[in-house]
Image (cartoon, grey):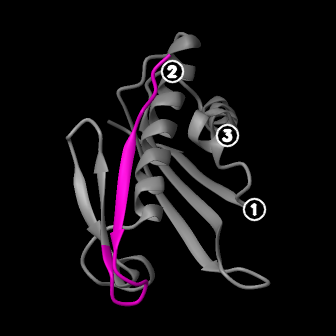
């Protein structure tokens, strides 16, 4: 199976330094700093990249589950919000992830969709990798095309 790679470099001390994260594929690189991670400064941060990975994985995994069930979705769109907060005993921890999924899926009723969406919440590979996060919340809804 595939092995994916990214790298990050940090220069300087924590408070005044900065870094860059790069995808090995060359499709993306971005700067990060304490200000972009814990404030509103320009740049990215590890949590934003986790959110992108989780949203992408969830959308693909739900699509795969629907397809295996013989149901062809028109669109599955997911956004993820990753919360990082002070941890008990010091430091920081990701303590909540919110997945918000909107899907156009002809030929499925809401109960079946909710069951499949909930199963995907724990079944997608990124969700499984993030199992130590105390709460992964899901809001999934069917919409008309």
The furthest residue to the bottom? 15
The reply to whether the C-beta atoms of the residues labelled 3 and 2 are less than 8 Å apart is no
45 lies left or right of 118:
left
User: 115 or 145, which is in the foreground?
Assistant: 115
Mark in the foreground, 1 or 2? 1
Give the residue drawn at x 65%, y 57%: 137
Q: Is residue 46 above or below residue 38?
A: above
- Measured from the top left, where is residue 100 in percent x and y? 50, 54
Is 91 on the left or on the right of 25, as rendered?
right
Q: Secondary structure at mark 3?
A: helix
Q: Which mark is residue 134?
A: 1
Q: First in sequence: mark 3 or mark 1?
A: 3
Q: Residue furthest front?
A: 12
Q: Secondary structure at mark 2?
A: helix
- Mark 1 lies on a secondary structure that is loop
Per the model, the C-alpha gap separating discs 1 and 2 is 26 Å
Quadrant where the C terminus is found in the figure: top left
Pointer 3: what residue? 128
Q: Position of residue 44 (x, y in %)?
A: 32, 67
Q: Count neighbours of disc 3 (C-alpha within 10 A) and say few if under 14, some if 14 to 19, many if 20 or more.
A: few
For disc 2, the neighbor class at 10 Å (few under 14, some 14 to 19, many from 20) is some
Q: CA distance from mark 3 to mark 1?
A: 12 Å
Pinpoint residue 58: horizontal percent, then vertical percent: 51, 39
Distance of label 3 from label 2 (alpha carbons)? 16 Å
Check disc 2 and report the residue beneath it: 64
| CB under 8 Å between discs 1 and 2 | no
- Please give left or right for residue 132 compared with residue 8 in the image: right
- Residue depicted at x 34% and y 89%: 16
- The boundaries of the magenta stretch are 1-18
> 127 or 75: nearer the eye?
127
- Upstream in the sequence, badge 3 or badge 2? 2
């Amino acid at each position: 199976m595939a092995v994916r790679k990214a790298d990050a470099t940090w220069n300087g001390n924590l408070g005044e330094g900065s870094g860059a994260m790069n995808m090995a594929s060359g499709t993306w690189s971005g700067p990060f700093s304490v200000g972009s991670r814990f404030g509103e400064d320009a740049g990215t941060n590890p949590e934003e990249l986790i959110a992108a990975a989780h949203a992408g994985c969830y959308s693909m995994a739900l699509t795969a589950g629907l397809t295996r069930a013989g149901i062809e979705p028109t669109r599955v769109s997911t956004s993820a919000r990753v919360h990082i907060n002070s941890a008990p005993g010091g430091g920081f921890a990701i303590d909540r992830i919110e997945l918000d999924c909107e899907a156009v899926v002809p030929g499925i009723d809401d109960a079946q969709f909710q069951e499949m969406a909930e199963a995907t919440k724990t079944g997608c590979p990124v969700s499984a990798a993030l199992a130590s996060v105390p709460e992964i919340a899901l809001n999934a809804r069917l919409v008309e095309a």
